[in-house]
Amino acid sequence: MAFGNGADGFTSNSNLVVIAINNIAFNNAGSQLTFTTYSNITPDFTIDGFISYQKDDLTGIITHPS
């Protein structure tokens, strides 16, 4: 589960063979799911059972200082 992150919920970090199964993303500041790789590489991502939910107003998210 990725909840209330200041950036994306789930990312591939340019890894071309990410497997994401039964994940939930909720109210992340960036996108809920970002899988990318380099343009000269063919990705082999597997995504199954992904639930994504974003509330309209993110002002209620609690953040923790670094």
Image (spheres, grey):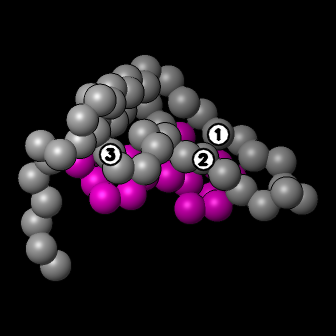
Identify which amino acid the numbered label 1 is placed on. Phe
Q: How crowded is mark 2: few (under 14 residues within 10 Å), some or many (20 or more)?
A: some
Q: Residues within 10 Å of mark 1 (few under 14, many from 20)?
A: some
Classify 60 as above or below 8: above
**Residue 58 versus residue 6: which sits nearer the camera?**
58
Label 1 – label 3 distance at C-alpha: 21 Å
Q: Residue at x 16, y 78 (%)?
A: 66
Along the polypeptide, which appears first: circle 2 or circle 3? 3
Magenta region: 2-19
As helix, strand or loop, the secondary structure at mark 1 comes to loop
Q: Please identify, in this view, whether the residue under mark 2 or under mark 3 is nearer the observer.
A: 3
Residue at the disc numbered 3: 28
Q: Please identify, in this view, whether the residue under mark 1 or under mark 3 is nearer the observer.
A: 3
Label 2 – label 3 distance at C-alpha: 15 Å
Is-magenta flag for residue 61? no
Residue 1 seen: no
Residue at the disc numbered 1: 45
Q: How crowded is mark 3: few (under 14 residues within 10 Å), some or many (20 or more)?
A: many
Q: Where is residue 3 in the image (x, y as percent from the top left)?
A: 23, 44
Identify which amino acid the numbered label 3 is placed on. Asn
Identify which amino acid the numbered label 2 is placed on. Phe
Label 2 – label 1 distance at C-alpha: 8 Å
Q: Where is residue 55 in the image (x, y as percent from the top left)?
A: 27, 29
**Residue 64 appears in which quarter of the rendering?**
bottom left
Q: Residue at x 35, y 50 (%)?
A: 29
As helix, strand or loop, the secondary structure at mark 2 comes to loop
Residue that sits furthest to the right in the current view: 40
As helix, strand or loop, the secondary structure at mark 3 comes to loop
Along the polypeptide, which appears first: circle 2 or circle 1? 2
Is-magenta flag for residue 12? yes
Residue at the disc numbered 2: 35
